[in-house]
Amino acid sequence: MSEIKSNEVYTTQEAQELLKISNSTIKRMLKNGLLRANKIGKQYRIMGHEILRLVSPALEEKTVKTYQKIKIRTQNKVKDW
């Protein structure tokens, strides 16, 4: 596995290979703002520190907490039906 350098600029293809995800997944992550990038012409460029932020344990914890809140809200709404 290659080392992700925080100050290096990666293409979406390189980011896909580093994260081992599909093209549609990386597009969805960019669209939803989960992965921040700069658009140069018609292509995206992703900074290494954004990829590192994405795979950090702190982000995973935050995601789990957010998911749990959404799950509870959904259960409460459905319960009243």
Image: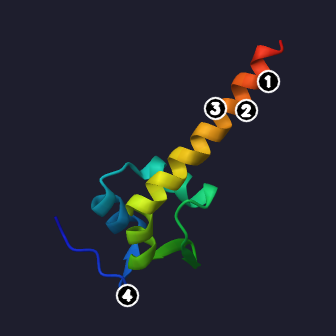
> Where is mark 4, residue-wise?
7
In this view, the mark in front (1 or 4): 1
Q: Which mark is residue 77?
A: 1
Point 38% across, 48% down: residue:
22
- Tag 2 near tag 3, CB within 8 Å: yes
Circle number at residue 62? none
Drawn side of residue 63 relative to residue 15, left or right: right
Check disc 4: other Cα within 10 Å, few if <14, some if 14-19, many if 20+.
few
Q: Which of marks 2 and 4 is in front?
A: 2
What quarter of the picture does the C terminus occupy? top right
Pinpoint residue 23: horizontal percent, then vertical percent: 42, 52
Q: In this view, does 21 lie to the left or right of 60?
A: left
Q: Determine the CA span between mark 1 and mark 3.
A: 10 Å
Disc 1 crowd rating (10 Å Cα; few below 14, some 14-19, many 20+) is: few
Q: Name the residue under label 2.
A: 73
Label 2 crowd (10 A; few <14 / some 14-19 / many >=20): few
Q: What residue type is labelled 4?
A: Asn
Residue 24 point in image, percent of width and height: 47, 48
User: In the image as oriented, which residue stretches furthest toward the top?
Assistant: 81
Disc 1 and disc 2: Cα gap in Å?
Answer: 6 Å
Give coordinates of residue 70: x percent, y percent: 67, 37
Say whether marks 1 and 3 touch (CB < 8 Å).
no
* SS label for mark 2: helix
Please say if the residues under marks 1 and 2 sit with CB atoms less than 8 Å apart: yes
Q: Determine whether label 1 and label 4 are within 8 Å by CB.
A: no
- Which three-letter amino acid code belongs to the residue tagged 2? Arg
x 45%, y 53%: residue: 60
User: Vertically, is 66 above or below 1?
Assistant: above
Give coordinates of residue 65: x percent, y percent. Answer: 56, 46
* Disc 3: which residue: 71
Q: What element carries label 4?
A: loop
Task: Give the mark nearer the N terminus: 2 vs 4.
Answer: 4
